[in-house]
Amino acid sequence: MKLGTIPVWDTMNKIPGGIMVVPLFLGVLVNTFAPSSINIGAFTTALFKNGALPLIGVLLFCSGAQINVRSAGMAVYKGSLLTASKVIIGTGFGVLFAKTFGPSTALLGITPLALISALGNNNGGLYTALAAKYGDKSDVGGIAVLSATDGPFFEMALMGAVGVAAIPGKALFATILPILIGMLLGNLDDKIKNFLKPGITISIFFFAFPLGAGLNLRTFIITGIPGIFLALLTLSTGVISYIIYKLLVPKKSRRTCVSGAAVGTTAGNAIATPAAIAAIDPTWLPFAEAATAQVATSIMLTAILCPFLVDFLYKWEQKRGLINNNIPPASTPDEATA
């Protein structure tokens, strides 16, 4: 096979969350078996060992640029509803668990930091694809608001509000400032928005390796089963959001309710949340390694399981004549399967 024709990219994309998972596990393997190879100093160490936080900043900046404040009407309502559902039910559950039982008490082996990091956000790309296939245009437009769950802002805000972490107002503002600047620029100029969009994928690809380089393979072995439980809990936030969507979105304004279930995932950027929280409040540092491993498992499994959940609920609604055919689908059948 000629050099340049090896399908590295395509192979990586066959793995759920592969853009994040593959470099993360490469970092874990290097740190487990050859840690000195990335501790040689200069740009090598700066990028492959210590580069996670600035690259997460790039992610937040580029993600902020994709939040469209001009989205209006039902798209904003649906997006706000699903965002509130994920944050209150998902992050809120993790924060209340930590407040009640303490940061060191595990639920089915899941650390409170992993609960907080995994449950409150969602895979925006997967949501958009599922909403386009099963929902209507306002469901797809809801991603403009759902994008606000990118990054650790809501997690830090709730943790600080209930007193489970010392999150100074200045640090909280410093967390959201890259998002706000990106949002400002992206809404002022669509060309800047489009220019920054690839930065989301690029930054995830790059910061995943140094995050992995802070972990050990032993951690993944120990946290494997709890990571599966975390994925199932995350999937359950999609079931709850489906019910909330069905109760609070008027029938005349929805084609189907299954876009509510499409938020039952953990986004790739959630892999950075434990480290970001521990960087601001060091009391959470002892739990960051296990939480990162558990979140990584949830990212992979929910990317696989959530489409099956959405498809099951859609077929269930079809059999009962609950699809509102007066509202056109977001995409044609050909586009939906593309």
Image: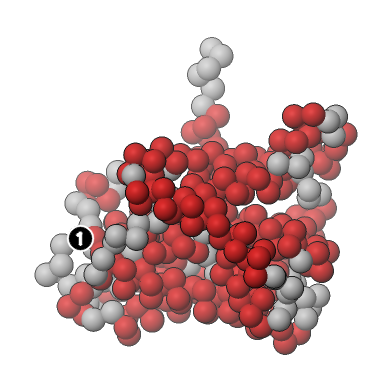
Query: Which residue occupies the foreground of this view, 328 or 158?
Result: 158
Q: Which residue is painted at 15% across and 62% down in the image?
A: 328
Q: Is residue 169 left or right of residue 45?
A: left
Q: Is residue 95 left or right of residue 42?
A: left
Name the residue at the top extreme: 2
Q: Position of residue 102 (x, y in %)?
A: 78, 81
Quarter residue 170 falls in: bottom right
Name the residue at the front extreme: 170
Q: Position of residue 159 (x, y in %)?
A: 66, 75
Q: Is residue 5 left or right of residue 249?
A: right
Q: Secondary structure at mark 1?
A: loop
Q: From the viewer's perspective, is residue 251 above or below residue 218?
A: below
Classed neighbour count for the residue bearing mark 1: other residues with Cα under 10 Å, few (<14), some (14–19), many (≥20) = many
Q: Which residue is painted at 31% across and 73% down in the image?
A: 77
Q: Position of residue 305 (x, y in %)?
A: 49, 61
Q: Given the image, on which type of amino acid does mark 1 rest?
A: Pro
Q: Which residue is mark 1?
A: 329
Q: Which residue is painted at 56% across and 69% down in the image?
A: 154
Q: Which residue is painted at 66% across and 83% down in the image?
A: 162
Q: From the viewer's perspective, is residue 271 above or below residue 138?
A: above
Residue 84 appears anywhere in the view: yes
Name the residue at the left extreme: 326
Q: Position of residue 257 (x, y in %)?
A: 31, 73
**Colouring:** secondary structure
Name the residue at the right extreme: 36
Q: How many marks?
A: 1
Quarter residue 233 falls in: bottom right
Quadrant where the image shows the N terminus: top right
Residue 135 appears anywhere in the view: no
Q: From the viewer's perspective, is residue 102 above or below residue 263?
A: below
Quadrant where the image shows the C terminus: top left
Query: Which residue occupies the foreground of this view, 315 or 163?
Result: 163
